[in-house]
Structure formats: structure tokens, C-alpha cells
Image (cartoon, rainbow, N blue to C red):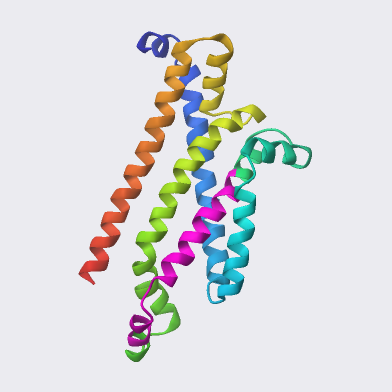
Amino acid sequence: MIDYLIQYPDYIIVPFLEHLKITAITMLLSCLIAGLVSVLIMRSKVLSNLVVGMFSAVYAVPSLALFAMLIPFLGLGERTAIFVLTVYNQYILVKNIIAGFQSINPAIIEAAYGMGMSDLQIFFKVRLPLASPIILAGMKVAVVSTIGIATIAATINAGGLGTLLFDGLRTQNMVKIAWGTLLSSLLAVGANSLLNLLERKVQKITNEN
């Protein structure tokens, strides 16, 4: 494996960087959209259940089928992969964001109002810190899911580590398969570890406050 990396570094490094790029862009867009959607619907339980149910139905569609459905509209490549991955993540993220905010004891919010805090102050200083553990748990699931499904996106010419894996399967090259599997696993473990670290820091700040 090391010999292959030394001889053909671009065959390994380029797909890894492509996979990292797809994952990073997807998670950024996913979190921004999910955060906005959640803030808009979380005050209505009926609307929250409706939106989460809608995203759940989309999440149930196999990724290959959804890729195929969107190719006529978005074409092949990275853009379609990012769009599909972002849509998939909405179910995981929106569900956890809403669950996080709903888990807060109403008495705490009432106490914050009693102290004269504004809605904006309560959101950033009370609601968000208390909901963050559940939100971060959803982000961990979403990022691992994104890394996995992004591998399948190689079938629509989106690049990434799936290119290395599928090429290895096609040519029965075990070195390519091993590198693709190893890097996908390391990427998932690394992202999960970073979010675990962030979660511990957030909890520490919340406890101090």
C-alpha cells in the first residue's frame, strides 16, 4: 500500500481531497438550511411534525434512486451529489435541532424572561447552549452519513473516494480498495472525533455558566 502511495500519490490524494470538499460543503449548507428551517417551524408542533415527516419520506428514498432522478435536472457531477446529500441531511439535522430545543425545561425560559433577557439573548445564551448536545449528536450522524453516501456519488461522476473504491472493484485491485476503505473510515472517525471534542467544550462552557 505504501509503495502504491509513493508511485501514484495523485490517485489517492486527489480523491481524498475531493471527498473532503464534498463533505465540507454539504455539511456547511446542511447546517445553515436546517438551522433556518428549524427556527421557522419549531414554535408550531404541527408544522414541525409535518416538515420532519416530509424530510423522513425523502430520506427513505435510496441514494442511487435520488441521484438518478435528479440527473436530468442537475446533470452529472459534484453539484448533484452535494444537493442530494444536503437534502438527506435535513431529516437528521432538523429532527435533532427541534428535539434539542423542545427538551429545554420551560421553567428555565420563564426564569430568563423574569431576569429581563430579550428573545435574542435567551436564544443565544439559554436555548442554544442547552440544546447543543442533541444538535451536535445529530451533526455527528449527518457527517458520517454524508461521508458514506458521498462514496456512492462517484457513480454519477462526482469524484471522491468512491472513484478509488469502484475502480478497485472493477479492476480487482485490492490496494485501491484498501486505500479507499481506509481513507473513508479515517475521514469518518476524524470528523466524529472533532465533533466529540466540540461537544465536550460546549458542555464545559454550559456547565461553567
Which quadrant is the C terminus positioned in?
Answer: bottom left
Q: Is residue 98 above or below residue 182?
A: below
208 on left or right of 43:
left
Which quadrant is the N terminus positioned in?
Answer: top left
153 on left or right of 7:
right
Please, which residue is most extreme toward the left here?
Answer: 208
Q: Look at 64% across and 53% down and name the residue there.
A: 57
Question: Would you say the magenta stretch is mainly helix, strand or loop?
Answer: helix
Q: Position of residue 48 (x, y in %)?
A: 57, 69
Q: Look at 66% across and 33% down and name the residue there.
A: 77
Q: Is residue 106 magenta?
A: yes
Q: Look at 37% across and 82% down and name the residue there.
A: 109
Please, which residue is most extreme toward the right here?
Answer: 72
Q: Position of residue 131 (x, y in %)?
A: 38, 66
Q: Position of residue 60 (x, y in %)?
A: 61, 47
Q: Which portion, as a residue range, is magenta?
A: 85-111
Q: Look at 57% across and 58% down and name the residue there.
A: 33
Q: Is residue 162 above or below residue 111?
A: above
Q: Is residue 83 above or below residue 121?
A: above
Count of numbered labels shown in the rendering: 0
Q: In the rendered image, which quarter is residue 152 located in?
A: top right
Q: Is residue 102 magenta?
A: yes
Q: In the rendered image, which quarter is residue 115 located in?
A: bottom left
